[in-house]
Amino acid sequence: MTSRKILVTSALPYANGHIHIGHLVEYIQTDIWVRFQKLRGHRCIYVCADDTHGTAIMIRARKEGRSEEEVIADMREAHIRDFAAFDVEFDNYGSTNSEENRQYCHRMWSEIRKAGLVKEKDVEQLYDPVAGTFLADRFVRGTCPKCKSPDQPGDNCSKCGTTYTPAELIDPKSEHSGATPEIRVAKHLFIELEKIHSFLNEWTQSGEHLQPEVANYLKGHFLGDDLRDWDISRPAPYFGFEIPDSPGNYWYVWFDAPIGYIASTTQWCNNNGENVDDWWNADSDAEIHHFIGKDITYFHTLFWPGMLKTAGCKLPEKVHIHGFLTVAGEKMSKSKGTFVMASTYAKHLPSGVLRYYYASKLGSGLDDIDLNLEEFVAKINSDLVGKVVNLASRSAKFVSGATLSEAYPDDGGLFAAAAAKGEELAALYEACNYNAAMREIMALADKANKYVEDTEPWVLRKDPTKADELRDACTVALNLFRQIVVYLAPVLPELAKQTEALLNKPISSWDESQSPLTGTSVSEFHHLMKRIDDKQVQQMIEESKEDNAADAGETAAVEFHAADTWKDAGDALGNEPLAEECTIDDFVKVDLRVARIIEANHVEGANKLLQLTLSLGGGETRNVFAGIKAAYDPETLVGRLVICVANLKPRQMKFGLSQGMVCASGGGGKEVFLLSPDDGAVPGQRVH
RNA sequence: GGGGCCAUAGCUCAAUCGGUUAGAGCAGCGAACUCAUAAUUCGUUGGUUGGGGGUUCAAGUCCCUCUGGCCCUACCA
């Protein structure tokens, strides 16, 4: 096998926020791939960096009353800590706000200029005169010009769906300062991508660099038409690099961010006596692999190859694109506590198991992966603790302090068969089909457990004349275990280390899976991994809800406080479980209206019912029989507002026709609590 | 508004170019076992492949349509 020279990157996390478990899908996926390549004996370096530029950082720094540099330095420290907690091991972690990056931006820019791809155009943009910044559309809010709904975003109305430009809003306000934005014209610089259209066609459609669905997407969506000019500058003030030949203009963050890959490589090279050109020049013999999420496909498959090509740089061998993380089948949600920060996770659960869980879900496609919390617990306990680690648990202590057999015993061909799987597993890792790899590896663990079951070491142990047989059985079990650990080493580096200590032999190469250990000593056995408990997961979710409440401003803070103070019991909810999920359409079918009780009477002969006359206003009334006699006096009801189901099919009752229902909570009898609207509601209003 | 991706067992996923009777793991159920962290082994239930239509000798797979979910974008793509 010839040794490859591989440079790997993950997308640069933005310095405006902390790492969460969604981010980790990518870094874990990449780290596994890198560890795999290293284990295979290739030269592989993994670089990343913080993405530090742009308006958001500038605004944040201003709000916090400190410099951008201070903001990004703090975040960088937090990012590095979070990654380390999950065994994501970079060879270099840089920053786009570095001297190396500035220099490479200059170099690339001059090449792009030279190639004649840059042109200037005037762009109209909203400007906040108080904050002194240009405004992205989403930072402007105002009244919709069509339906007059207040407080709508700058691009379309959330009420009526009309699209418009921020300039069309009635009474627009800047989110930053509340000032009325003005339109200013500024000169922007554009890269004419159309000029390299044929190159992009060729590169994206070659079938070598992109997943097929990505190539198709680009072909259908962008490459079929003329490519639009790409706006790569922003006028001052902007936190970033000033464009050398266009004073007062700065490179848009998406121009300098991917160059950060090269800058980070440069730092690594400087620290390791290498030359960055040996990695990034067009004639380099390195393979470049980018791992990114599907949201930034466009930048990495069109702009970036275009920039690299124009500047005479090495093009990516592959752009590996993955989907997003959902939790419990839905988008991560702050209020549901599923928006879990890496640091919060790490407080409650071990990091390795998340690596394994992600690996067991990740395929080579762009599908989102789901973190199903019950499945997570079950899978870790069953696969890792029950199957894999159990192999060591059930055999190591019989040979602790002793040595493995001098010759590898007959195991019915198990070890050899699993060794023969090595190349197939390697191919799965290489193709990022980790889920298939994990399935195969677990099948090996099943077979190994069956071996232990069949040889019955616990029986052999009782017969002193069978000491050799016992040692042989344990030798096989521990070797099968170690072989599995080698295959899992890219995913579970910690387990690999523990296994090295247990069996006193390093796991530094994939080839360790190919030949069994014999005659080596076995250390005292300690548990290698703990089962995880649903409670830990619940605590993590609870804390994530609190995290969110703590930093989401006043409203959330009140909710947090409320939850803490009132300690409402779960009895009511428990007694009557939630109904089956309904759609908004289902809900809309039920026409709830505010109504005034204009008459309330006892019903002759009825035990539970009161007769109510409800007014919906304008002379529209409903006769309703309500089972609230035990809880309410008719006299006290007259005049009050209630909520009624106004379109309920009328029902003939013993005492007359009932034309609706009034809404109330409670278990019945005296436990009935009518719903009323807040002050200001008037009869006839619909409840939405 | 425009575009893309997705929907397979209770859950999470497979199924090569359209080709046998749609397969695994987990959960469930029934046994065995007791070395092991309530671990393991054996057996077993479970599917009109989201709905409807079409192409084909043959459709989970291709086409149309509807429903639902997700993502990107809204002439700075």
Image: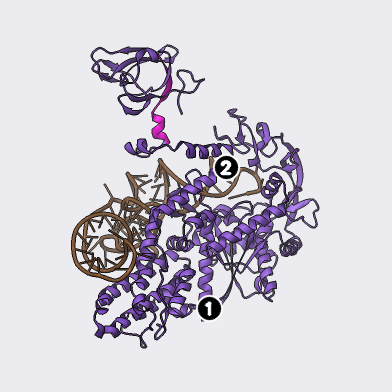
Segment colored magenta? A584-598
Q: Is residue A166 within the magenta segment?
A: no
- Taking A409 as reference, is A423 left or right? right
Q: Residues within 10 Å of mark 2 (few under 14, many from 20)?
A: few
> Measuring 39% from the left and 65% from the top, which residue is drawn there?
A384
A582 versus A528 height, above or below: above
Depth order, front residue of A440/B19: A440
Q: Quadrant of residue A8?
A: bottom right
Q: Position of residue A424 (x, y in %)?
A: 42, 74
Depth order, front residue of A218/A584: A584
The letter of the brown chain is B
Q: Chain A shown in which color? A: purple
Amino acid type indicated by mark 2: Ala
- Residue labelled with disc 1: A41
> Measuring 32% from the left and 83% from the top, which residue is drawn there?
A472
Q: Is residue A156 visible?
A: yes
Q: Position of residue A435 (x, y in %)?
A: 42, 64
A223 versus A487 height, above or below: above
Depth order, front residue of A560/A415: A560
- Residue labelled with disc 2: A552
